[in-house]
Amino acid sequence: MRIPTATYRIQFTPQFGFDNAKAIAAYLADLGVSDLYASPIFKARSGSTHGYDIVDATQLNPELGTNESFDALVEEIQSLGMGWLQDIVPNHMAYSSENDYLMDVLEHGPDSSYTDYFDLSWNAPFGDRQERILAPLLGDFYGTSLENGHIQLQYEQNGLTVNYYSLKLPLRLESYTKFITQNLGKLTRTLGRNHPDFIKLLGILYILKSVPSEVAGKQRQDQIAFIKGLLWELYTTNDTIREFIDENIKTFNGEPGNSESFNLLDELLNDQFYRLAFWKVGAEEMNYRRFFTVNELISVKVEEVRVFNNTHSLIQKLVEEGKFTGLRIDHIDGLYNPIQYLERLQEKMGDVYITVEKILELTEELPENWEIEGTSGYDFLNYVNGVFCQTENESSLDKIYQNFISSRVDYASVVKDKKHLILEKNLAGDIDNLALLLKNVSSKYRYGNDFTLNGLKRAIAEVLTLFPIYRTYITPDGIGDSDRATIQEVIRQAKEQVPLLQNELNFIEKLMLLEFDNSLTQTEREQWIYFVLRMQQYSGPLMAKGVEDTTLYVYNRLLSLNEVGGNPGHFGIELAKFHAFNKQHQETWPHTMNTTATHDTKRGEDVRARLNVLSELPNEWDQQVNTWSAINRGHRSDRHGFAMPDRNDEYFLYQTLVGAFPFAEREHASFVERVKDYIIKAIREAKVHTAWLRPDSEYEEACTSFIEKVLDPAISREFLEAFRPFQQRIAEYGIFNSLSQTLLKITAPGVPDLYQGTELWELSLVDPDNRRPVDFEQRRTYLSAIREQAKTDILGLIQELLNDKTDGRIKLFLTAQLLQARTNYVSLFQDGDYLPLEVQGTYANHIIAFARREGNQTAIAIAPRFLTSLIQPGDNPLGESVWQDTHLQLPSGTSHTWKNVLTQQSLKSTETLSIAAALAHFPVALLVSN
């Protein structure tokens, strides 16, 4: 197995394809990256900017380049000694006209060869629901869309389709008969009964009527293709038949303003295997499983062996050819049986590096029986971020926040409220489906016979709302101790919350704990297990939508803590817990990924580094934010006595400005537009005054107008003069937090992962802002100059970088030096023990230090924090004048001579090591024993 030394995440898009990646491969290798970490590169919906809306996993995405350009990229990275870590998407595909598998299902219904590919009510093993598959993809109500002429019939070589803008859905075979017989008498009179082409058309009608009853499966599809070919031949060779078909198309498409004229098309649509609907319908009615609440992403039944083999065939081929050397599994918690999936993946792919996208709560552990190397790094992100939050100031930040918004806020209560909101507004249809399934199970037992559908639905909702983790991993083989404890605690809490549902909750607990009655038949046991595994698939989406995509935009005490996988109810991480976390990683998951930024993070890693500084300065922050609000009071709008933006959104905005304000003045104009776009997404995600399901344009316009005014120097000179000095001060301290964070990520147990562009300052906001193009040429030029000067005058270079920190070269220098050290001492950092080091002296609490040791080799990482009380803005945290008597205890038996691999300077020690000496030239240190 190839274990990466360091990965670099690339977001492939139609504007940044295989050729573009090939052009930067040498730069990445020079930076010290060992493995390209690629976003999904399989055929996706046209114009996809992220690649997760896959339409065919058996093909590379042609919009990224040809197969030849892909091979050229692979050849280039292999020539540089690099590997390829590929993000794969087993859970879902795009609900799109370009998804041929899904279009086959919508055209042929139960006779399709691909019905088992998708998680539909049709193929539920214990269901009998055969209603039309929902297609909630319309931008307005169905009737409105129809009568406005936005839904149109079209005929082309592949047959009849229903078109709605770019959406194009096929018609079932039976609809051709209804279409062709419309106005057939007129064609008879025009063409004549004995005309050979008219006879052919009658023959087509005869075959159409006999196909459904005579043939099925592949044979049926072949015959349909034959019929379509005959009809197209008539259409393209006989002008009269062409006019007849075109006239029928026009007739069916109706005339806007004449509702009766749409009856034919309405009847035709009602006869399909799918039901076109307003996209908002998907929140309350749903008969296919989605990715979270995204209608346009339909879940795949990858638990079916045939589906698994097909969707992983190209992946397996590229692994066997050595082109992929690692895999990252997207949304593992969405799968029906993650353990079974991982076992099949190992069997197919062999001994290849595998990590999973998995959100772990602070005290949750990754299941040890998973045959993987670890997670994609959100757990590390939240630990390393939290250690820069000054925990002792929690009550002060609480008070500042609650005074500003004039309300007391309890994080746990917000989470519960927002999860209930999501269940009621976004996942109602999915919960209905679970309740129906549970009703079917309970009705077979005398103690469950009286359960009502409503009572079961309320009980399920309460259990899912109280779930403290993304999901459990109960399988047909049993339940683990930690999952058992989770279920029991959730049921206990649920009984306190809804005491009238004791019996229903007891029954759910009995099911979830697999406490089978001896009298159960095999079928009943399987139905029971099916409900349990199904139930597990919905706790994750509820956590994601209720916490990540709602609560984290509502609970705004300190935004640096509002991150994917984070829990802002915990105000930072104690240093001892950070060390314990790293130590456990080294013992159990030494090759897990360590990240500080991804395509999904809520804000850039350096935005969080800045905002953490606020935890050190509660009194100043309190004064500043209230001063700003008073200055800007006149810029807020009024609606019936209610100010817009409200105080909570205003507080959110000020933190955003402090964290993301660019260093360069030339970026100011684009920054204003970025923040306006961001605030719209944020307040819609918050779902308080506006939402994706119910936009409030007046509130949204008030927020964007407020942003325009407060950031306009001509209008808000007083605010900007008050804001900029404080913001610049925070940014200065944030730089040092960022450098420390970079050091910890690259030297701690695990594989360090860099998100594209983050080797310079990363001040982006949530997607799509964090997918903006990266200026790789600038980075290449910077790195080349740094490498060259470091050869002859590294201390002079460092002084230059310290004098001009805002351009980000200091972060690039640090990243390159650290990655070079990982390459030079690969075994030490991959396999070495993790030893927390005791720091003593005046500023002991301001240093994070640990050693990595393997055999006779030792490395020591030293990262400062909480610098606002140590240095003034413009100063650097260097030397004895800052660190005084602060020192660390060296591990017993280590060398007394060291080399700082960042500065290339030598250092001597005794049983202790002076922090002042270690940080004489650079704000962080990595010492390696000589």
Image: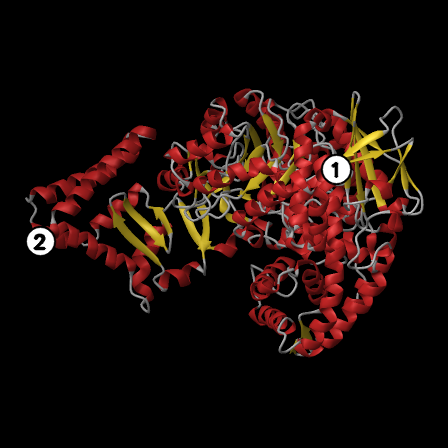
The C terminus appears in which quarter of the rendering? top right
The residue at which mark 2 appears reads as 189
Residue beneath the point at 45% across and 27% down: 313
Residue beneath the point at 64% across and 47% down: 544
Where on the picture, by quarter, is residue 596? top right
Does residue 504 appear anywhere in the picture? Answer: no
The disc placed on residue 269 is none
Residue 589 lies, with reference to residue 503, above or below; the image says above
Label 2 to label 1: alpha-carbon separation: 72 Å
Q: How was the colour assigned to the protein in this rendering?
A: secondary structure
User: Label 2: few (<14), some or many (≥20) within 10 Å?
Assistant: few
Amino acid type of the residue that numbered disc 1 sits on in the rendered structure: Asn
The residue at which mark 1 appears reads as 506
Residue 374: percent from left, percent from top: 67, 31
Amino acid type of the residue that numbered disc 2 sits on in the rendered structure: Arg
Residue beneath the point at 58% across and 24% down: 352
Observer-nearest of 211 and 350: 350
Residue 528 lies left or right of residue 208; in this view the side is right
Observer-nearest of 47 and 152: 47
User: Label 1: few (<14), some or many (≥20) within 10 Å?
Assistant: some
